[in-house]
Amino acid sequence: MMEPAGLAVILNPSAGGGAGSRRFAPCAALLSRAGFHFQVLETRQPGDARRLARDLAGGTAAPLIVAAGGDGTVNEVASGILDHDGSSAILAVLPLGTGNDFARSQGASSVEKAVEILVRRQTHRVDAIRFQSQIGGCRCTSFALLFVAVGFVGDLLRATSPSVKRMFGRRLSYPVGFLRAWILAVSKPMRLTHDVGSHAGECLLVCACNSEFAGGHSLRPAPGAVMDDGQLELLIVRPLARWQIGSQFLRLMRGTHLAHPGVISVKTTRMHLESTAKPGVQADGDHFGEPPLNLEVRHKALTVLWNCGSQLHSFLT
């Protein structure tokens, strides 16, 4: 059993294009100077972080579990906690990845700020997205904190390869990935239902957002979205000409893309999506098989450490 000031750190050494271990070294020094006792559990393959977090969250103690990595690592650790419905485990983050969008939303824009949040131990409950998709021929249940998407996002993630991340760094890698994906972007037939209606036809992208930002906070797919209101911002992008995709990228960076007639935006708590083209499902920067996709918001399902200065809908209420 860990001491009261103890932490369980789940470290992804491959985070940030393979720089996770190197980036963690100064974090370890900061944690020690702050008086923390911690154990480090390293992942070796996808799924390890979820399994480790599940084991920790299912123990008799109420652990503080630190996801040391990028948004994919945060997703896995959060999922491991959420596998235990009603777990008292608390999620914290050390941002070692490329985008670090959850950490930035949490107020941890740097490892120094992340350690400050650990020291303050102010908690808040945030929403999570619970979804089912087809993975390897089986229906699998997964979770997301930031977004679940079908369509163009998959091309973007493939184009933002580890080599691109290493070459262009945290600020430019996702815009570069967007431009690479733009060359091959195609729309696909999709059928979906949500709280206020349905949509059928060719779509470039369908994205259920729990957070306002993506791509290292360089993109604003869901302006005004907050992570604790029990609702998702559903973004449906109809087919666009290639030149329109390029211009919409600039709008996406500013958060003004919703005014385009080819973009539909609605609030919802659930979504069901099917597609004969079998486009990939992506969540929080990782791939999760293909449709049929069912998702729903789980209101304030996860306890996290949070900077009280960060903007949340009900943090001060």
Image (tube, grey):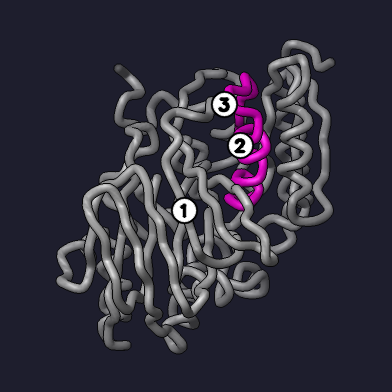
User: Pointer 1: residues within 10 angstroms few (<14), some, or many (20+)?
Assistant: some
Q: What residue would you read off at disc 1?
A: 294
Furthest residue in direction top, as rendered: 4
Q: Amino acid at mark 2?
A: Val
Relative vertical location of residue 33 with respect to residue 205 in this rendering, above or below: above
Q: CA distance from mark 2 to mark 1?
A: 28 Å
Front: mark 2 or 3: 2
Q: What residue would you read off at disc 2?
A: 93
Q: Is residue 8 left or right of residue 269?
A: right
Residue at 56 percent across and 18 percent down: it is 121
Classify mark 1: helix, strand or loop: strand
Quadrant the N terminus occupies: top right
Q: Is residue 23 left or right of residue 296?
A: right
Residue stretch in magenta: 70-92
> Looking at the picture, how far across and down is residue 109, in whole percent?
50, 42
Classify mark 3: helix, strand or loop: helix
Residue closest to the eye, 290 or 121 = 290
Q: Earlier in the sequence, mark 2 or mark 1?
A: 2
> Looking at the picture, how far across and down is residue 147, in whole percent?
45, 52
Q: Which mark is residue 116?
A: 3
Q: Does 116 appear in magenta?
A: no
